[in-house]
Image: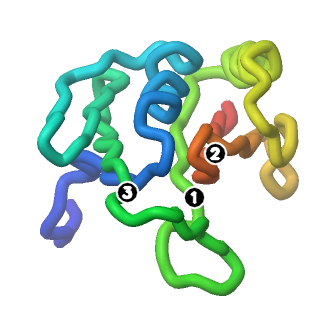
Amino acid sequence: MSDASTRGIHHIGLTVAKLEESASFFTTVLGWNEARRDEAYPALFVSDGRVMVTLWKNKEEPAIPFDRVRNIGLHHVAFELESEAELKQLYDKLLAHQVEIEFAPELVREGPAKHMICYEPSGLRVEFIWPGA
């Protein structure tokens, strides 16, 4: 048994420049559900049934893109898939939706795990990983 004080992720909060487009990436492309909206902030909450992602609209313009090499902060967020076939299907779906791909599904080190990374509409790096057999 672990001595950890936490039980996993409740939600991830991401600041985005393109709120509706970023939400559509999760709902239309990934098939997530919109859980709720907060027009006052504004923010959209989306979920795959296990994890909630809060998408917060940036308040200042112009938005300053994150530089994963220079800045401290979120390098990427990673979501697990159940099978290698699902990873390939998602890759094809991302291509069909003209999502910018950093790299196509490839082995993680020697495998059998495979992963890929793309950019959602606001430019955040999103990884999808199948952990292997």
Q: Residue at x 19, y 53 (%)?
A: 7
Q: Are marks 2 and 3 in contact (CB under 8 Å)?
A: no
Q: CA distance from mark 3 to mark 1?
A: 18 Å
Q: Residue at x 75, y 41 (%)?
A: 116
Residue 119's x, y, as percent?
68, 44
Residue 38, quarter of the rendered image: top left
Residue 110 falls left or right of residue 128: right
In the rendered structure, which amino acid carries the disc numbered 3? Asn
Q: Quadrant of the C terminus?
A: top right
Q: CA distance from mark 2 to mark 3?
A: 22 Å
Q: Earlier in the sequence, mark 3 or mark 1?
A: 3
Please tell me whether mark 2 sits on a helix, a strand or a loop: strand
Residue 87, quarter of the rendered image: top right
**Label drawn at residue 127:** 2
Q: CA distance from mark 1 to mark 2?
A: 7 Å
Please tell me whether mark 1 sits on a helix, a strand or a loop: loop
Residue hosting label 1? 76
**Front of the two marks 3 and 1:** 3
Residue 84, visible in the rendered structure: no
Q: Residues within 10 Å of mark 3 (few under 14, many from 20)?
A: some
In the rendered structure, which amino acid carries the disc numbered 1? His
Q: Is residue 5 above or below residue 76?
A: below
Residue hosting label 3? 58
Q: Earlier in the sequence, mark 1 or mark 2?
A: 1
In the rendered structure, which amino acid carries the disc numbered 2? Glu
- Residue closest to the far front: 61
Residue 14 falls left or right of residue 78: left
**Label drawn at residue 11:** none
